[in-house]
Image: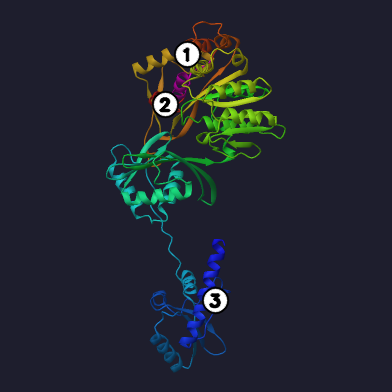
């Protein structure tokens, strides 16, 4: 029996009991189930306070003569019924009372006196040393009702554009922080009682245990309604036991398939042409490298979306699936329960895919299987942990050894970072002597045509200016990408033709071919006024 059937049966039993009580009290019984949610209200007969206090509700007023009808419950004072009967009779009017169930009374009262919608203040991010904002948000969270506090926090994080919510146990209280544009900001400090509410909701929605003494992973979804529109928020949940209790991190993925578009990544024309050239080929290996939170998944999904046409079979292997994309077969690989990317990849190759995305290359088996797939008529996309494109070659060679097949399969490696974009309130200033010297040295081997007409003798930089709308002077993030097209010169390192295989030598060879490094791309973005040198230094 499902929940709906249980509720229906419970209501039926209550109505039968009320009918029996009506006979004892000498009042006519009224079953309101057929009309209680749509009958017209009669709001001018009784005050809402009277209706709450005396458990009495107006039913209707009408008829050829003045005829009043009221609904009462077993809690309505009999003296009130007698008094009202006398008053209406003295004035020559007719009045009737009907006994209804407690459930019917509650439904009618919700219509006569609907709960007032409570609007809580929006969460604001506190600046460094801003204890006043921290205290204010903490107070707001303390007043949000128990059943709404978890949803309120997620909704506010989404409104702020946060990528993570961190719930952390400290000795005396719980600290809540949010990562906005890559920076962790303290939001509130709450007492331990509210922590139990958070973790209780988390355990039921994400299927994690509050009592576990091991790290856990979970997943949940939430529909966010805002300004007449809605979007689906995918939330990945990670918990870990600490000295004072379970810490939790909620990673928020604002799923919007239309945003998974290469045109929206802010790539230069040259970068886009290089990517299009590589992914238009029917086979080969494309690697995306960078640390956690550098936007690798979004770029890979955007490439998949660009390839997602009716004449291609696309399969992904992911741990976990972060975005669901129409038209693509996505397979979850649970590596915590013994699943393996290599094993999954060998299985899906039998399905004759044109394009395969492997969530991450973590071991030699997966690397060798991906390389084998990429030379047998498949385009293989994957992510890999390395700091730069050149470092990715060194790491891969450490993983699988010098491998001639890898040299013929790898076509493109992309490394990327996300840096905060300056808001329109930014302020221009001349570069200091030290800054100018650093910039000139870093860009000394960049061809003039790639400097976009920038004058390195008179360098202008930009600083963030805080405003009420953008309290840190930044608005959103932009991609800084390093792209290494694998040429014959680079293949020599992978095949072992060059004895000294190290990151610096590979990068030097790539720069000679015209590759701009992450550092150079970041500096150029700072010179264009898109970001700051400090932000480039922090991220790259």
| SS under mark 3 | loop
- Residue 193, given in percent of the width and then of the height, sits at 33, 52
- Residue named by callout 1: 503
Q: Is 269 a magenta residue?
A: no
Residue drawn at x 61%, y 29% is: 345
Front residue of 401 and 311: 401
Residue at mark 2 to residue at mark 1: CA–CA distance: 20 Å
| SS under mark 1 | helix
- Residue 518, given in percent of the width and then of the height, sits at 47, 20
Foreground tag (3 vs 2): 3
Taking 171 as reference, is 225 left or right? right
Residue at mark 3 to residue at mark 1: CA–CA distance: 79 Å
Which of pointers 2 and 1 lies earlier in the amino acid sequence?
1
Q: Is 520 a magenta residue?
A: yes
Which label is found at residue 539?
2
Against 331, residue 174 (above or below) is below
State the quadrant of the C terminus.
top left
| SS under mark 2 | helix
Which of pointers 3 and 2 lies earlier in the amino acid sequence?
3
State the quadrant of the N terminus.
bottom right
Q: Are marks 3 and 2 in contact (CB under 8 Å)?
A: no
Q: Main SS of the magenta segment?
A: helix
- Residue named by callout 3: 32
Question: Which of the 4 image quadrants contains residue 238?
Answer: top left
Q: Does the image show residue 457?
A: no
Against 521, residue 293 (above or below) is below
> For the magenta stretch, what is the residue range?
515-527
Question: Which of the 4 image quadrants contains residue 244?
Answer: top left
**Which residue is outermost to the front?**
338
Q: Does the image show residue 489?
A: yes
Which label is found at residue 304?
none
Against 291, residue 454 (above or below) is above
């Amino acid at each position: 029996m499902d929940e709906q059937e249980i509720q229906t049966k419970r209501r039926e039993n209550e109505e039968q009991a009320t009918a029996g009580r009506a006979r004892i009290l000498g009042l006519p019984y009224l079953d309101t189930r057929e009309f209680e949610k749509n009958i017209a209200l009669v709001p001018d007969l009784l005050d809402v306070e009277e209706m709450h206090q005396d458990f009495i509700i107006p039913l209707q007023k009408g008829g050829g003569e003045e005829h009043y009808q009221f609904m009462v419950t077993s809690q309505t004072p009999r003296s009130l019924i007698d008094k009202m009967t006398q008053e209406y009779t003295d004035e020559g009017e007719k009045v009737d009372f009907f006994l209804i169930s407690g459930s019917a009374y509650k439904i009618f009262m919700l219509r006569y006196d609907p709960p007032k919608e409570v609007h809580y203040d929006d969460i604001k991010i506190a600046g460094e040393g801003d204890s006043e904002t921290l205290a204010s948000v903490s107070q707001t969270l303390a007043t949000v009702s128990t059943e709404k506090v978890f949803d309120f926090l997620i909704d506010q994080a989404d409104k702020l554009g946060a990528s993570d919510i961190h719930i952390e146990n400290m000795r005396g209280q719980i600290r809540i922080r949010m990562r906005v544009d890559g920076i962790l900001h303290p939001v509130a400090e709450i007492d331990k009682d509210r922590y139990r509410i958070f973790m209780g909701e988390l355990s039921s929605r994400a299927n994690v245990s509050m009592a576990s003494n091991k790290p856990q992973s979970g997943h949940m979804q939430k529909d966010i309604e805002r300004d007449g529109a809605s979007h689906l928020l995918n939330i990945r949940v990670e918990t870990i036991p600490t000295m004072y209790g379970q810490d939790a991190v909620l990673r928020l993925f604002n799923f919007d398939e239309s945003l998974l578009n290469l045109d929206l990544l802010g790539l230069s024309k040259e970068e886009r042409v290089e990517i299009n050239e590589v992914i238009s080929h029917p086979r080969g290996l494309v690697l995306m490298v960078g640390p956690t939170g550098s936007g690798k998944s979004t770029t890979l999904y955007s490439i998949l979306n660009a390839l997602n046409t009716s004449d291609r079979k696309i399969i992904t292997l992911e741990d976990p699936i972060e975005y669901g994309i129409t038209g693509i077969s996505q397979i979850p690989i649970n590596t915590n329960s013994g699943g393996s990317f290599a094993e999954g990849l060998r299985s899906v190759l039998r399905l004759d895919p044109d394009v395969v995305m492997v969530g991450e290359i973590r071991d030699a088996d997966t690397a060798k299987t991906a390389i084998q797939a990429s030379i047998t008529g498949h385009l293989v996309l994957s992510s890999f942990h390395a700091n730069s494109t050149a470092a990715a070659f060194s790491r891969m060679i450490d993983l699988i050894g010098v491998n001639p097949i890898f040299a013929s399969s790898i076509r493109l490696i992309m490394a990327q970072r996300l840096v905060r974009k300056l808001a329109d309130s930014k302020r221009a200033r001349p570069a200091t002597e030290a800054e100018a010297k650093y910039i000139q040295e870093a860009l000394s081997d960049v061809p003039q045509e790639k400097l976009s007409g920038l004058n390195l003798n008179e360098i202008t930089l930009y600083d963030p200016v805080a405003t009420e709308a953008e309290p840190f002077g930044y608005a959103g993030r932009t991609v800084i990408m390093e792209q290494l097209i694998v040429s014959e010169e680079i293949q020599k390192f992978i095949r072992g033709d060059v004895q000294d295989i190290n990151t610096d030598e590979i990068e030097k060879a790539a720069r000679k071919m015209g590759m701009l490094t992450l550092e150079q791309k970041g500096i150029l973005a700072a010179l264009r006024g898109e970001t700051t040198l400090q932000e480039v230094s922090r991220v790259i």
